[in-house]
Amino acid sequence: MRRWAAPVISILLIAGCTSEGDRPEATSRPDTTPRGGTLRVAIPPFTEFTVDLDPQSSYFGGEWGLFRCCLLRTLYSYSGKPTEEGGGEPRPDLAIGPPVVSADGLTWTFRLKQGLRYAPPFEDTPITAPDVVRALERDARIKAGPDDYSFYFSAISGFDDYEAGEADSIAGLETPDDRTLVVRLERLTGDLAYRFAMPATAPIPPGAADGHDEDYGRFVVASGPYMIAGSEGLDFSVPPDEQEPAEGFVPAVLTEGGATQELGSLVLVSNPSWDPDTDRLRAAYVDRIEVTIGLDREEIARRVNTAELDFVFAASSPFDQVARYQDNPALERRVFVHPFEAFYSVTMNLAVPPFDDVHVRRAVALAIDRAALVELLSEPPYGPFGQSWGEVATHMATDAFEGRLLRAFDPYPYDPEAAREEMRGSVYDRTGDGRCDARACRNVQVLVMDEGVIPEQARAIGEDLAELGIEVTLQAYPWWRFFNLIHDPRNHIAMGIAYPWGQDYPDGGGWFTLFERSDGLEGWWNQSSLGATPAELRGWGYQVTSVPGVDDRLQACLGLRGVSRTQCWAELDQYLTTEVVSRVPFMFFEHAQVVSERVVAYSFDQFTALPALDRIALAPGSS
């Protein structure tokens, strides 16, 4: 994700963690929003999500939504509001305010608030700086597999050594006292506050995670306004294999394809240790939250209509339900639509001809009718994973963390004639007629995610590419097989339709880093061989010997803050879109939510792109 610089960094952080972030969320007027009641939501069966409440291994928006709103506090967090209300800015949570940052930008000092305590059975245990260190050590140690995101903390001195088992502690983490955390960095990392808002950094009390490398999600100790029902009965004094998990969490049992075998459930109740005077970010309007896990989407929609459930969580409401409510003046107030900060793209492998030629890649970008692809979202079987609302994507990243600098940037409008002209500049158009006439353009193997409307979109893309002489063979696989295949560079996947991507946090560091940096090449998210070395290409069996990379630009941006950082992301976006063209983004999603008649206050959490459960309020008397 970024650019060059070695700036002198002041004691102020970033826009969201400066003086604005240190002020109370509340205004002078009292909050008259109704309190109390039981919020009832349901999570449909999709992907491998059965609710993993282990903060060091969970890597899914629904889980992060439950952490932010309810279960866990971190040094910095978010207000559970949309971007236009400041919801994308990290603000002090456990921290008193902004950190003190050294002149060279490599030492950050955080101070924790006084009077913070955990939920039962650790209600008498204060939250301290060593507890944050314990969380980071666990994050490095448990190695959560392909969804592990410990790389976000590798900039901390000694983190990688500890992760590799070459050190007994993380040298760059110091706790001179219980309320002070000093972080020493190997390289400039201007978004450290965003990273310390990720759930993996939430404090862990002494002994709570011992012996629970595989199942801490069933024993997680809360620090937020809610805890798992029955947590007070957890007994950490007995050996870990004899401990019984909290009764309020029963994971769903899903098939490999994501179908529900057994429904799961999660019940959250008020945490008696939580002090709202120390928490300016969470409203915690309801007393209790009940989550049904694995319920069919259509059944969820039916129950929302009858107020048996209040809304679907971790997915948009079905297209037909949203459309029906929007068309009814009596119901339209119960529909909320917000930008999702996620897109789908066509990926091209820079090491597979003809996509090793940038002229071909640009021609592909000009040839695809993106507006027609977005229109297909509104037709059965509707969008992938229940996301049926969106808009055309014209460049590589969301406007939210680029200061809207590229809001009018559209270098590849649908233009078949311009596409053919671009193809004429390619070595694969030997006759100069604007069509690829080389063998590399025959029988191009295209991997297609068989989910929702994506196969229909793939067929439309194939028709567009045929006008350029690129003849594709579409191979559709279920989502889990699609990801397994496209993540392995040895498979020589020429093109993928359609790869989804969303932010890890609302900054370019949480967007570009994974899918554009070279160390994400194998088993991660870089599907285009971008940044691969000649030795790697040779080892994977490619004939192409070199491909472009952007690691230097990414690292340069990571070292910046403020306006310079925003500008850097926009420039990187432009470079990736016009000079590299490793992918063609074609649609940004919007989150469309229908709520029950019981909901009287609603808020959208821009960090997780989901409803902010702590800011949902119910009509008085809702049990």
Image (cartoon, helix red, strand yellow):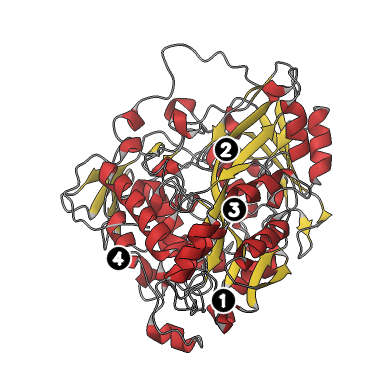
Tell which tag, 2 or 3, sits nearer the viewer: 3
Sequence-wise, the earlier of marks 1 and 2 is: 2
**Mark seen at residue 221:** none
> In the rendered view of the protein, which quadrant contains the C terminus?
top right
Name the residue type under label 4. Answer: Asp
Left or right relative to 502: residue 618: right
| Residue 209 in sight here | no
Please tell me which residue lies in front, 487 or 610. Answer: 487
Q: Residue at x 45, y 11 (%)?
A: 29
Q: Residue at x 76, y 65 (%)?
A: 256
| Label 2 – label 3 distance at C-alpha | 42 Å
Identified by mark 3, the residue type is Asp
Give the residue number, with chain letter if any, for mark 1.
488
State which tag comes first along the sequence, 4 or 2. 2
Nearest to N terminus: mark 3 or mark 1: 3
Q: Label 2: how many residues lie within 10 Å, few (<14), some (14-19) or many (20+)?
A: many
Question: Which residue bears the numbered disc 4?
Answer: 552
Of residues 326 and 256, the one nearer the viewer is 326
Vertical side of 527 occupied by 242: above or below? above
Q: Position of residue 303 (x, y in %)?
A: 82, 34
Q: Position of residue 319 (x, y in %)?
A: 74, 39
For label 1, the SS is loop
For the residues marked 1 and 4, what is the alpha-carbon distance in whole angstroms?
24 Å
213 displayed left or right of 595: left
The foreground one among 406 and 441 is: 441
Q: CA distance from mark 1 to mark 2?
A: 37 Å
Q: Residue furthest top?
A: 29
Mark 2 lies on residue: 70
